[in-house]
Amino acid sequence: MSPVELLHFQQQQALQVARQFLLQQATGLSSPSSNEGKQPAVQVPVSVAMMSPQMITPQQMQQILSPPQLQALLQQQQAIMLQQLQEYYKKQQEQLHLQLLTQQQAGKQQPKEQPLGNKQLAFQQQLLQMQQLQQQHLLNLQRQGLVSLPPGQGTVPLQTLPQAVCPSDLQQLWKEVTAAQPVEDSIKQEGLDLTTNTSNSTSFSAAKVSPPISHHPLPNGQSTMHTPRRDSSSHEETPGSHPLYGHGECKWPGCETLCEDLGQFVKHLNTEHALDDRSTAQCRVQMQVVQQLEIQLAKESERLQAMMAHLHMRPSEPKPFSQPLNLVSSATLSKSTSDTFPDGLPHPPTSATAPITPLRQGPSVISSSTLHNVGPIRRRNSEKFCTPISSELAQNHEFYKNADVRPPFTYASLIRQAILETPDRQLTLNEIYNWFTRMFAYFRRNTATWKNAVRHNLSLHKCFVRVENVKGAVWTVDEHEYQKRRPPKMTGSPTLVKNMISGLGYGALNASYQAALAESSFPLLNSPTMINTSSASGMLHVGHDDVSSTVEQVNSNGSNSPRLSPQQYRSAWLGARGRGIVLVGVTGLLEGLGLRDGGTWGTGSCSLPHMARDHTGMEGVWTESFLGLHPAGPAPRG
DNA sequence: CTGCCCGTAAACACGT
DNA sequence: GACGTGTTTACGGGCA
């Protein structure tokens, strides 16, 4: 899965999470298991009740309505919204199930069923992880929404919001999952039954991310997964209960007053939460929370549409940045590969052959060079021979832009890329800095370290030439010198992983996901078809090289998009990588191929014309000897 | 084991 | 003096 796709799938999962959040917020519930009753219908003018918060300000609402009306209005509005959301998500989920089912059936028809099953499992596991991360994201969103709470007013307790799952929980859960049944079995039980699978996944996730402050802790040994607290999302209210009452306590934001029964609660509600400034303010806050979630929901929904369109799950307008990795003929590929330089007018390979539903193409569905590229920068992914950087950045720049992930390229490669991206092929040091920070969220921190490294590389490598300019000095690239550098040999050892992970201060969530991914190896490239088709497109795909055209969208705070911690990404990728999960994308395809011992691709050459493998081993370097750009070919430095 | 690459840190010089 | 820029050295890790 490419970074872009990954983010998109995050968005998809955010839909699920947002739904839960929204439901909780809309019902004012703080506990996921406190919604057994239904509030007697309160009569509120429907015209008013139907008003969305965007149409009427809280102040106006307050003026229009009497206190009981206001309260009733909120409840009624929430109920309506709830219902609509339910229907909406039901449809969304049904469609998703349908698509996944199609994918699954397509996999059944294929001779190699196992890889697909594994792929699905990994896919699901990624979705789970995405859900968790999305929850964190939305949690932040909610917190932002609560910032506007007037001072002195009651605060909405954060424990009313879903908490981020703690790593230990995740690990334990994954242990239970993997221990309960082998991966293969779980695939058969879950992966092949997608009708229930997605819902299982959802409830699983919901259980996993439920607040750890459970009032009814599960006994040891009992898997939370098998006993999902479905009440977290269940809002069917039964008579005799109240949306704001659950688990014997008042669920009014910031209250949590214990009430023995509903009657006492109602009394408490009327006395403590009558219409006053404080309650009104809290209502306002709650409305803002709902509003934000609605907005977020709309965004996520939109992204989901685009994602599904991109994945050919449903016809829709394509997304600008994620070109489908369609099958590409060799002729097309050869043409594309001529665009080696960033400004080489990229032309994404429009499929020359009939598009095969990507659901059957593992690489297209779960495709990413980044998946196993995301690692230490010394992963030495050089674009010398097949334009990985430009294409990878072009295709995944959104990912690097927002995700705090270290780009899998050396400093030298990055610097060169930065310089070559400019029209005049020259940059000042400061401009190089800016390029780094603009393009990579990772380089928005530890500036002293990487800036020093940049300077160090500029001075050290002969390929970078300093040119005195009128306005100072600029740096250019001596392409010849650059090509003279020793062809990088891929590395991806666990030690590097460890090195990278230890170098970062993040320490949560990774182990479980890594383990999960690790347990779900799926040799996608077992199929020669994949290699010769989509893999080729990935290999030679140029994509939008005009990275700079979109970098202006970079949010300076970098927090407008759901983000994974670098370790989460990294461990996910590396976990997948370490276990042979091959995720095919642009450059990653090459290494993906190399991950397999033997296989369709020999060690000397591949089936594509003009392609030859320079290095055998885990991650060799593929060269395109026909490229006129490097007439001398890869000149290993002596 | 060695040589190389790479990242990181640091010292130092120079100019603004 | 602070800062940015540029150079250089040293060191450790990883890999072939």
Image (cartoon, coloured by chain):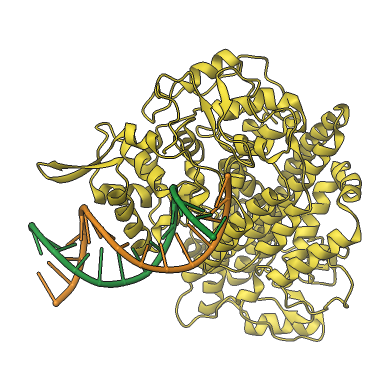
Chain colours: A yellow, B green, C orange
Q: Is residue A76 visible?
A: no
Q: Residue at x 65, y 68 (%)?
A: A164
- Front position in the image: A454 or A116: A454
Quadrant of the drawing holding the C terminus of chain A: top left
Residue B14, picture quadrant: bottom left
A577 or A195: nearer the viewer: A577
Q: Residue A399 versus residue A255: which sits nearer the camera?
A: A399
The reply to whether residue A189 is in sight is yes
Could you tell me residue A4's position as x and y percent?
56, 42
Residue that appears at 69% across and 68% down: A165
A530 with respect to A175 (left or right): left
User: Looking at the rendering, in which quadrant would you find the N terminus of chain A?
Assistant: top right
In the displayed structure image, the side of residue A334 where residue A451 appears, left or right? left
Q: Position of residue A68 (x, y in %)?
A: 63, 70
Vertical order, A353 against A140 (above or below)? above
Q: Position of residue A267 (x, y in %)?
A: 73, 84
Quarter-wise, where is residue A202 in the image? bottom right
Q: Give the vertical position of A127 relative to A602 (above or below).
A: below
Residue A251 position, x and y percent, is 69, 76
Q: Nearer the viewer, residue A470 or A206?
A: A470
**Left/right of residue A531 with respect to residue A379 in the rendered view:** right
On screen, residue A181 versus residue A635, left or right, reads right
